[in-house]
């Protein structure tokens, strides 16, 4: 699918006031949803639970602590968080970048960390929040095989948000949650 990069950049920067009204309910703003991650801004203590082996039938979880600092970017049409955690005896730093497209009213989310700092950057997961739950999907490759990736954010209790990552090796028919994070204000 061909993307008009100038229109996409204008949309992310909030320059695209000419978003067509078709598809929007009467009185609904094109940037509805741009504040979905506002609950997450600030400093957090994080409790991680990661499945020891993914898509291998593992039931063994590894638990560890970390921190996260999140802040808005691009006048509210984006945000970033800086994460620090110890994993496999190493301190890992990671960054999550999110951008909001007011035309589609969806978020794109990318993640990069010090385990592979030169990339490649995974394809973004894309999606939106509905009633306090954000669900985001992408197609990716894991161990040489195509998978679906799902991120789920629960902001139903904004003081204690929850995030999960799940993989599907069967096109989304079944899902294996392999990483979960519980946040509390630092």
Image (tube, grey):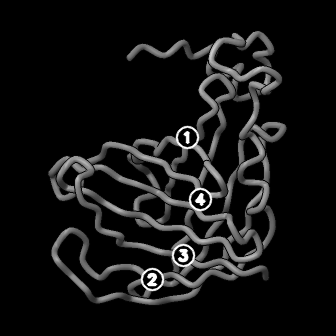
- Residue contact at pointers 1 and 4, CB within 8 angstroms: no
Q: Disc 1 on helix, strand or loop?
A: strand
Nearest to N terminus: mark 1 or mark 4: 4
Q: Disc 2 on helix, strand or loop?
A: strand
- Residue contact at pointers 1 and 2, CB within 8 angstroms: no
Nearest to N terminus: mark 3 or mark 4: 4
Instruction: Check residue 95 in the rendering and tell me which mark sits there, or answer none.
Output: 4
Q: Dot 3 corresponds to which residue?
A: 181
Q: CA distance from mark 3 to mark 2?
A: 6 Å
Q: Nearer the viewer, residue 4 or 112?
A: 4
Q: Dot 2 corresponds to which residue?
A: 49
Q: Quadrant for the N terminus, please.
A: top left
- Residue contact at pointers 3 and 2, CB within 8 angstroms: yes
- Residue contact at pointers 3 and 1, CB within 8 angstroms: no
Q: CA distance from mark 1 to mark 2?
A: 24 Å
Instruction: Check residue 108 in the rendering and tell me which mark sits there, or answer none.
Output: 1
Instruction: Check residue 9 in the rendering and tell me which mark sits there, or answer none.
Output: none
Nearest to N terminus: mark 4 or mark 2: 2
| Rendered location of residue 87, percent (x, y) | 44, 83
Which residue is located at x 54 percent, y 12 percent?
4
Nearest to N terminus: mark 1 or mark 2: 2
- Residue contact at pointers 3 and 4, CB within 8 angstroms: no
Q: From what the image shows, is residue 27 above or below residue 53?
A: above
Residue 38: quarter of image: bottom right
Which residue is located at x 23 percent, y 53 percent?
173
| Rendered location of residue 169, percent (x, y) | 19, 55
Nearest to N terminus: mark 3 or mark 1: 1
Which residue is located at x 71 percent, y 42 percent?
78
Q: Disc 3 on helix, strand or loop?
A: strand
Q: CA distance from mark 3 to mark 4?
A: 15 Å
């Amino acid at each position: 699918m061909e993307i008009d990069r100038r229109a996409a950049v204008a949309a992310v920067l909030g320059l695209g006031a000419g978003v067509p009204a078709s598809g929007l309910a009467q009185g609904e703003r094109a940037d509805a949803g741009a504040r979905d991650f506002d609950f997450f801004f600030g400093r957090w203590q994080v409790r991680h639970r990661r499945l020891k082996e993914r898509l291998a039938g593992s039931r063994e979880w590894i638990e560890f602590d970390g921190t996260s600092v999140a802040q808005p970017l691009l006048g509210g049409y984006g945000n970033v968080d800086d994460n620090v955690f110890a994993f496999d005896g190493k301190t890992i730093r990671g960054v999550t970048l999110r951008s909001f497209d007011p035309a589609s009213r969806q978020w794109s989310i990318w993640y990069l960390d010090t385990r592979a700092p030169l990339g490649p950057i995974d394809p973004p997961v894309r999606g939106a929040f509905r009633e306090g739950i954000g669900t985001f999907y992408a197609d990716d490759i894991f161990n040489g095989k195509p998978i679906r990736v799902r991120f789920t954010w629960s902001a139903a209790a904004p003081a204690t948000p929850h995030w999960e990552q799940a993989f599907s090796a069967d096109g989304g028919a079944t899902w294996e949650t392999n990483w979960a994070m519980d946040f509390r204000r630092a």
